[in-house]
Amino acid sequence: MSDEVGDRATTPLVDEALKKAAVAWVRVPDGPALALWCVPLEGALFVVSGPGEQKAPGLAGATEAEVTIRGDHGGRIVTFPARVSRVEPASELWASVAPAVAGKRLNAPGSATEMVDRWVADGCALSRLEPVGTPLAGAALPDGSLAEPPRDTPAVRRTRKPFRLHRVRRR
């Protein structure tokens, strides 16, 4: 049940999952899966990363990625391979897509136009993730655990209890 258009493959499951996605787990080759805020437009997901935006190491220079979309309760709906392309600020696609992506961003400082201008000035990357090939996982559940060990973090020390001048009595 896939409609092949070039090398872009689409299934009803992927199409519906894309339409409703607000967050996607994106894994570039040799990298961990990262939860990234995204906007579904034109049969693809658009992700903004860079200074002042979300961190997505390796996504701006990648050509392929693995995208997992989860449901409202955290369960995986579908995992599919995606072709990654960077949308350049001088392109026609940027002019039509960047304002739409900026308009969907929650808690945005300033207007959508100001945000798009800041993305250009700061060198942020607007990446397009288009599904290609056959979904890797969908209806079938994995046999084993997909849990990964925790990543290294600078938060390794327990904080001290706050200082109190006097003892508080409870009645």
Image: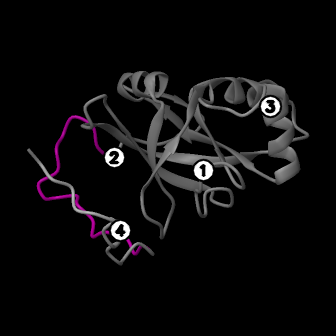
| Along the line of sight, the residue nearer the viewer: 63 or 76 | 76
> What's under tag 3, amino acid-wise?
Leu
Mark in the foreground, 2 or 4? 4
Q: Which quarter of the picture shows residue 80?
A: top left
Q: Which quarter of the picture shows residue 68?
A: top left
State which tag comes first along the sequence, 3 or 2: 3
Q: Relative to 82, is 80 on the left or the right?
A: left
| Residue at the spot of label 2 | 136
Numbered mark located on residue 163 in the image: 4
| Residue at the spot of label 1 | 54
Residue 100 image position (x, y, % from top left)? 71, 23
Residues drawn in magenta: 137-153
- Callout 2 environment at 10 Å: few (<14), some (14 to 19), or many (20+)? some
> What's under tag 2, amino acid-wise?
Leu
> What's under tag 4, amino acid-wise?
Phe
State which tag comes first along the sequence, 1 or 4: 1
State which tag comes first along the sequence, 2 or 4: 2
Compared with residue 152, is residue 72 higher up or lower down, i.e. above or below? Answer: above
Numbered mark located on residue 11 in the image: none
Residue at 72% x, 34% y: name it: 109
State which tag comes first along the sequence, 1 or 3: 1
Mark 3 touching mark 2, by CB under 8 A? no
User: Alpha carbon of mark 1 to alpha carbon of mark 4: how far?
Assistant: 36 Å
Numbered mark located on residue 93 in the image: 3
Residue at 33% x, 73% y: name it: 160
Residue 98 image position (x, y, % from top left)? 76, 31
